[in-house]
Amino acid sequence: MEQTASTEVNKITTYHWLLFVICVLSNVFGGTVSTLMSVYLPLAVKDLMGEVDVDNFNFISAYVNSVFILGWAIGGMIWGILSDRIGRSRAIVLSIGSYGLFTILTGLTNSWILIMTFRFLSGFCVGGVLVLTPIILSEVWPEKTRAIFIGILSIGFPIGIFSAGLIDLFVANWHQAFFVGLIPLALAIVCGFTLRESEQWSNTKRESGIQKIKVTFNKNHRGDLLIGSVIFGAMLIGLWGIFSWLP
């Protein structure tokens, strides 16, 4: 009897597979959106400003890419807190749909101020997706294979980075390239009809955000949090330095 119950708990259902595909696709297109401006930046600068010297180009590139990463960092924190209040599934739908929308708006504008604004907002929402998808998988996926599939999920973002280069091979116009945001926008609509709320979140939603923050920063977790932040932060600085400047 106990063995049967354990098998049911660890069974991967059709809904689990659907959730996993949604999480992977949202990460893939998050990676695409993240690096698309780096790929098309020379064309965008020439289109909006004409020929510029290397120093001015680097100056523009630094701002455009920095605001995206700043938005990503802030979004990673805000969306986590927001998901504690409104639920994992709602937060995921909003973050996927929003980064799709702001990506489309980036391609529709000819103003650098608006481009940087929409890139900040795109980064803000991509940061939410990268935080929320592992959270919902860790709360919903069967424990026996959970670590394996969360590990596979992490491959989605690099695939998206590679895909941004593929788009450049087939789409010459940078405005048109940003219409790739239609895909995550459509994915968000699908998510709205298919995603279920995490039972674990439903059971703990009465805890306040302040209580959860206190648990995160208490003395038992503080050391691991600091070490993890330094290691992951160093990786991100190197990674984005390469992706932003190499094109």
Image (tube, rainbow, N blue to C red):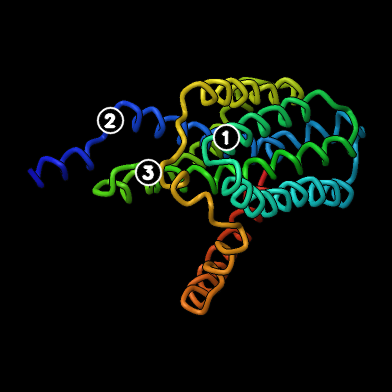
Q: Are marks 3 and 1 in contact (CB under 8 Å)?
A: no
Front position among marks 2 and 1: 1
Q: Is residue 213 or residue 49 the one in the foreground?
A: 213
> Residue at (63%, 47%) from the top-left corner?
82
Name the N-terminal-most of marks 3 and 1: 1
Other residues around mark 2 within 10 Å, as few (<14) / some (14–19) / many (≥20): few
Q: What amino acid does circle 2 point to? A: Thr
Q: Are marks 2 and 3 in contact (CB under 8 Å)?
A: no
Q: Which mark is residue 127?
A: none
Q: Identify the residue under disc 3.
A: 152
Q: Quadrant of residue 83?
A: top right
As measured in the structure, the alpha-carbon distance from the residue carrying label 2 to the one carrying label 3 is 18 Å
Q: Which mark is residue 90?
A: 1
Q: How many marks?
A: 3
Q: Is residue 245 visible?
A: no
Q: What amino acid does circle 3 point to? A: Ile
Q: Identify the residue under disc 2.
A: 13
Q: What amino acid does circle 1 point to? A: Arg
Residue 44 image point, x, y percent: 81, 32
